[in-house]
Image (spheres, rainbow, N blue to C red):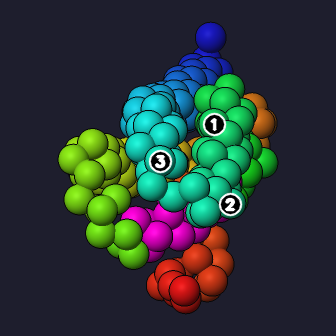
Amino acid sequence: MNITQIITLAVVALIVFWGVGAYNRLIKLRNEITNAFAQIDVQLKRRHDLIPNLVEVARKYLEHERETLERVTAARAQVVAATDLVRNQPNQAGPIKSLNLAEGVLSSAMGRFQAIVEAYPELKADESLRDLSEELTHTENKVAFSRQLFNDATLDYNNAAQQFPANLVAGVFGFKEATMLQSTSSDAERAGVKVAF
């Protein structure tokens, strides 16, 4: 074996080792996205369990606000269905977009619900409702933190998959761009809740 063959073999071996390292790093980062969504899923499950209890406590006070209660319940069901889709494909754009939309609908419905609660002093004073509302607030904070971790993991993955030369490995092995979770998806969602009685 001459020196040229040895150098060629060494370069090929370096490229192969680098490619395996880049591939393994992308797999690790993609798995971190899955783990980050699992953390969100735990918090969403807690929230989804709290919302029906909150609605049930309010139901006895708000018989004439039935439409709002039904909207909250329907929005919760949409989020649960969207969460199930994301759980199976946490780094796919379609399910993440569906979850973002469903979360927007639920946030809007819960905003209307909270505005109604504020308008009824006897409901607002109910100890069960206060306790559930406080638990829900804590859970929402945990969801927000978990979303931040998910988005950080997604950013790390996307950066690794798009930077040269790792993007060559990503392209060959089909590592697609992951989608971040959004807290709002439109200007209307960012606007404050308007209450008119």
* Sequence-earlier tag: 1 or 3: 3
State which quadrant residue 91 falls in. Answer: top right
How far across and how far down the image is residue 54, in percent? 42, 45
Residue mark closest to the camera, 1 vs 3: 3
Q: Residue at x 59, y 63 (%)?
A: 65
Write down the region rendered in magenta. 102-117
Check residue 113 for magenta coloring.
yes
Q: Which mark is residue 60?
A: 3
Residue pointed to by mark 1: 80
Q: Secondary structure at mark 1?
A: helix
The quadrant of the picture occupied by the C terminus is bottom right
Q: Can residue 14 be seen from the camera position used here? A: no
State which quadrant residue 175 falls in. Answer: top right
Going by the numbered disc 2, the residue's amino acid type is: Glu
Q: Residue at x 69, y 47 (%)?
A: 74
* Sequence-earlier tag: 3 or 2: 3
Going by the numbered disc 3, the residue's amino acid type is: Lys
How far across and how far down the image is residue 150, in percent? 45, 46
**Nearer-the-camera pick, 122 or 37:** 122
Q: Is residue 122 left or right of residue 35?
A: left
Q: Is residue 100 left or right of residue 141?
A: right
Q: Secondary structure at mark 2?
A: helix
